[in-house]
Image (cartoon, rainbow, N blue to C red):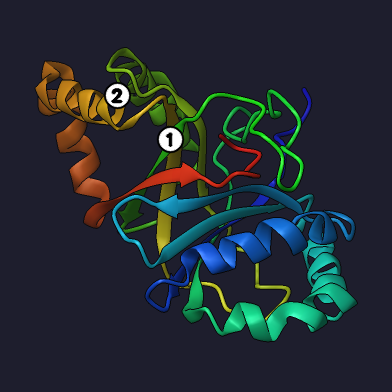
Amino acid sequence: MEGPRCPVVELRQYTLHPGQRDVLIDLFDREFVESQEAVGATVLGQFRDLDDPDRFVWLRGFEDMPRRAKALESFYGGPVWQAHRDEANATMTDSDDVLLLRPASARGGFPEPAGARPAPGGPATSPPSLVLATVWYGHGPFGATFAEFFQQRVRPVLAGTGGEPLAYLRTEHATNTFPALPVRTNEEVFVWFARFTDEGRIDDHLNRLEQSERWREELLPALSERWARPPQRLRLAPTERSLLR
């Protein structure tokens, strides 16, 4: 069986100075997409957080941890980042909120994109959509047994309420191979992503999930026992050049 797309994934959440998000997105979409992919990274998606005007969220993937190190060394030591890093860094107050993840199973990785990434300044190639990212924080690792529980028991309920997961990932426990960029350690997470056409569809999914008897009486109690703190939900609007959209 073919392995998952991007076996190593970073979920990166940046806190920005007020009013600077579109400045960063314009710079990112113009300068930091092809330049990263040329050295071996995959820019899976970049987003505006609908609930925080000063948060920029993006996903970056790699084939494995050694190639992650090589790609990051090449990009951050290369001419494009050197030319634009001061402008990029000036928009940010914090860029260290990074979760290092891997697909939770062979079926948990991000699917191949449906279409090509829009060209800089060009029209979008697909209708607008939103992505809901849900982060579950665990008391311990979310291993293979939990991944099977999610696939067999949780996923059907999510799908039945309109929130079919398109990817689900867990903490990558390998040592950070590029320590110049910190990642959050000593945390166990399980993160799943779903796509919606608009905010109303997200709200409808969450309402239907809350009303689901199976969710309330069977799944939520079992999940809550594993959670170290309340889940985090990120309602994300893809940028103009986001591949995940």
First in residue order: circle 1 vs circle 2: 1
Q: Can residue 141 be seen by looking at this rendering?
A: no
Residue 84 is tagged as none
Q: Which amino acid does label 2 sit on?
A: Arg
Q: Where in the figure is residue 192, as x and y percent of width and height?
A: 44, 39
Disc 1 crowd rating (10 Å Cα; few below 14, some 14-19, many 20+) is many
Residue 201 is tagged as 2
Front residue (pair 108, 27): 27
Residue drawn at 73 percent across, 37 percent down: 117
Q: In this view, does 75 lie to the left or right of 127?
A: right
Q: How far apart are marks 1 and 2 (CA)?
A: 9 Å
Residue drawn at 15 percent across, 26 percent down: 207
Q: In this view, does 168 lie to the left or right of 232?
A: right
Front residue (pair 121, 230): 121
Residue drawn at 41 percent across, 37 percent down: 146
Q: Where in the figure is residue 231, as x and y percent of width and height?
A: 26, 51
Quadrant housing the N terminus: top right
Residue 130 is tagged as 1
Q: Can residue 177 be seen by looking at this rendering?
A: yes
Q: In this view, does 29 lie to the left or right of 189?
A: right
